[in-house]
Amino acid sequence: MDYTLKRSKRRKTVAVKIAQQQLTVYAPHYVSQQHIHEWLLSKESWINAQLNKQSQQAETRQFPMRSGNCKLFAETLVINFIKDTKTQWQQDPSTGALTLSLSARVKNKQGNYQHLLESFLHSQLESYIEMRVSDYCQQMGEALPALIRIQIYKRRWGSCNRKRELTFNLHLASAPTWVIDYVIVHELAHLKYLNHSMQFWHHVAKFYPEYKKASDWLKDQGASLQWVFE
Ligand SMILES: [Zn+2]
């Protein structure tokens, strides 16, 4: 065991302090080295537990972690966190691995990595939704919506208003595409029926027959779609 020994004339007992993963032993001047060593051995498991706890705390404080993962369209993506000259996300075209880089000057690393991840997922979800909306609009004989927005919602997957503006929950980016398709058909059906009437559900079923399965999936698994670095 490595430690720094500090002796003092006024001290009556042996004590140990653990800070920044360093061990310091305080002892009265008359206590022998041998005695201190034995005393430390008797406390070894407690000391190791403290050192472990401190190193774990140091790791969580030293965000970024070097790597992590998230789900995109229900597939696990590896995320690498790096410091670089630029703040940006990049996706490896062959492995799909995502690299989030922050400039060394950026403060609040955790918040900014989260922000970068969200901007990546936003762009992936947006291009998927735009493509599927135009497919389904053709099938459903519907004109394109006035606007498609993506934002984080706590309690809904999508919305549609009288101005024909559709909004989708960013957390859908982690869901399987067949579930996202259901939310798209659901919101597009609201362009015709701004309610959840029988006719509305009939319209949904016509273009997405397994709507029950998809909406059950969201009820069961929806809460697992959120990503937070904590
Ligand atoms: Zn609805």
Image (spheres, rainbow, N blue to C red):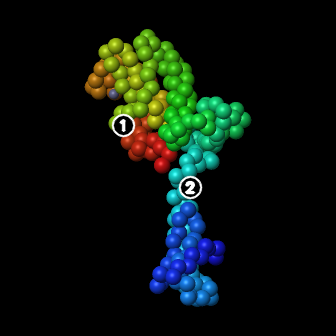
Quarter holding the N terminus is bottom right
Q: Which residue lies furthest to the front in this view?
A: 9
Badge 2 is on which residue?
A: 59
Q: In this view, does 77 lie to the left or right of 203?
A: right
Q: Residue 21 lies in what quarter of the image?
A: bottom right
Residue 194 position within the rendered picture, expressed as x and y whole percent measured from the top left? 30, 20
Q: In this view, does 169 lie to the left or right of 194?
A: right
How many marks on residues?
Answer: 2
| Rendered view: 99 above or below 196 | below
| Local SS, label 2 | helix
> Which residue corresponds to the image point at 35% horizontal and 21% vertical from the top-left?
160
Q: Residue furthest right?
A: 94
Residue 168 position within the rendered picture, expressed as x and y whole percent measured from the top left? 42, 27
Between disc 1 and disc 2, whose residue precedes? Answer: 2
The answer for how far apart the CA atoms under marks 1 and 2 are is 30 Å
Q: Residue 159 lies in what quarter of the image?
A: top left
The amino acid sitting under disc 2 is Glu
Toward the viewer: 213 or 24?
Answer: 24
> Which residue corresponds to the image point at 51% horizontal and 17% vertical from the top-left?
134
Q: Label for residue 154?
A: 1
| Rendered view: 35 above or below 149 | below
Residue 158 position within the rendered picture, expressed as x and y whole percent measured from the top left? 39, 28
Q: In this view, does 195 lie to the left or right of 133?
A: left
The amino acid sitting under disc 1 is Lys
| Rendered view: 215 above or below 5 | above
Q: Report crowding for label 1: few under 14, some 14 to 19, many 20 or more residues within 10 A (C-alpha).
A: few
Ligand 1 is in which quadrant of the figure?
Answer: top left
